[in-house]
Amino acid sequence: MVQGVLESLKLSYQKKLIRKLLFEGESASIASILEFWNSVNIKDCIYMISEAWESVPQLTLRRSWPKLLPEFSNIFNMLPGFENFWIKEITDWLNCDMEDAGFQFLNDEEIITEVRHSPKEEGEDEGENNSQVKISNNDAFECFSKILAWLEQEQSDSSELLL
């Protein structure tokens, strides 16, 4: 259904992974390559997937929507109150902010007025930095282990649970 999007994502991810191997690998020896693969962690993979997703062309994403619209129609029709929801309504809903750039063009005077009149909460910047809690590796591993145990206990497909 969305093979073009997934293919583009996978290719970009693989390029980033190989590029990381080439730039961070010390030599072309097998031992060096194995050391590299052992040093790649899940955090690195998540960041590479995120970067790969950002590099998927918008045109590829737009071309995938017509294939997904019938599926959206089926999902909406299962929701209470949306039994007669058609593809045209979904298309109109998805395109409702197509013309909106998501920001406003302001001149210098409007920017100054906006900054002067927007109330700044006291301690907004200071409180955010102090409130961050550092999570230990042991705590993260323990939570991850609990999630895996829970998923193994479930009878249904684990991919459906995560979505």
Image (cartoon, grey):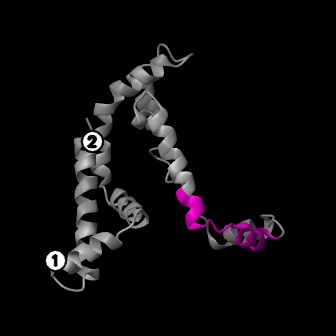
Name the image quarter holding the N terminus. Answer: top left
From this view, report whether residue 86 is shown above or below residue 2.
above
Q: Is residue 91 magenta?
A: no
Which corner quadrant of the image does residue 73 belong to? top left
**Percent x, y of residue 100:** 50, 49
Q: Nearer the viewer, residue 63 or 53?
A: 53
Q: Nearer the viewer, residue 51 or 116?
A: 51
Q: Callout 1, which amino acid? A: Ile
> Earlier along the polypeptide chain: callout 1 or callout 2?
1
Residue extending furthest bottom?
Answer: 26
SS of the residue under disc 1: helix
- Marks counted in the figure total 2
Q: Which residues are magenta?
A: 123-141
Q: Callout 2, which amino acid? A: Arg
Q: Is residue 136 magenta?
A: yes
* Residue at point 36%, 26% (across, down): 71
Q: Could one spot residue 150 in this view of the protein?
A: yes
The Cα atoms of the two marked residues, 1 and 2, are separated by: 42 Å
Which corner quadrant of the image does residue 137 belong to? bottom right
Q: Nearer the viewer, mark 1 or mark 2?
A: 1
Q: Could one spot residue 96 in this view of the protein?
A: no
Q: Nearer the viewer, residue 108 or 162?
A: 162
* Residue at point 81%, 64% (across, down): 119
Q: Which residue is mark 1?
A: 30
Image mark for residue 112: none
Q: Which residue is mark 2?
A: 63
* Residue at point 40%, 27% (across, down): 72
| Dominant SS type (magenta) | helix
